[in-house]
Image (tube, rainbow, N blue to C red):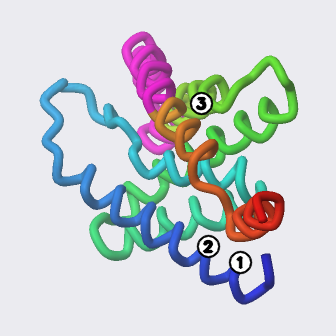
Amino acid sequence: MRRNQRIAYRGCLLALALVLSYLESLIPVFYGIPGIRLGLANIVTVYTLYRLSAADACFITVGRILLSALLFGNVTTMIYSLAGAAFSLGAMLLAKPFRCFSSMGVSILGGVFHNIGQLVAAAFLLKTGGILSFMTVLLPVGAVAGAVIGIVAGILIRRVPLEDEEDSRGEEDG
């Protein structure tokens, strides 16, 4: 993929992640525990991690968080999101090279570690370790959400090739 194409592709992925994040913010959460969300924008993160690079996944994730906070949120949500993203991306980047983790396994780790990162940030900001008791609920929820995101991302990874892959497939067929 040429440089200009890569920039445009990253821009499109960032826009898609931002739209998914916004759409998810419109879904009401009735669970009584803050922070429970599916994390639809992470479909784009996992896809980017497998189709482009770790740097691209970081760029898209941080870009989405900053733009979401600027457009729809506030500084507090940005801090929690950045902490969750740092833990999540770190876990996914460490797990991805191991063949024992599929894209779904990597996504599950991302979901779990995202919640850990947010809880660590909350404990730090609120100056109380009591908030960590939410882990008993948020870790299983993060695993389930990560599995759903991983399934969708896995399908996209297999079915949505990059332009270079399409070109090489067309040459093989012709």
> Disc 3 on helix, strand or loop?
helix
> Disc 2 on helix, strand or loop?
helix
> What residue would you read off at disc 1?
6
The quadrant in which residue 6 appears is bottom right
**Cβ–Cβ below 8 Å for labels 1 and 3?**
no
The foreground one among 70 and 104 is 104
> What residue would you read off at disc 3?
113
The image shows residue 126 at horizontal and vertical percentages of 42, 39
Q: Amino acid at mark 2?
A: Arg
> What residue would you read off at disc 2?
10
Mark 3 vs mark 2, CA separation in Å = 24 Å
The image shows residue 148 at horizontal and vertical percentages of 43, 28
Q: Residue at x 30, y 64 (%)?
A: 73
Q: Amino acid at mark 3?
A: Phe
The foreground one among 99 and 109 is 99
In the image, the segment drawn in magenta is 119-148
The foreground one among 46 and 143 is 46
Mark 1 vs mark 2, CA separation in Å = 6 Å
Mark 1 vs mark 3, CA separation in Å = 29 Å
Residue 130 visible in this rendered orientation of the protein: no
Q: Earlier in the sequence, mark 3 or mark 2?
A: 2
The answer to if 141 sits in the magenta stretch is yes
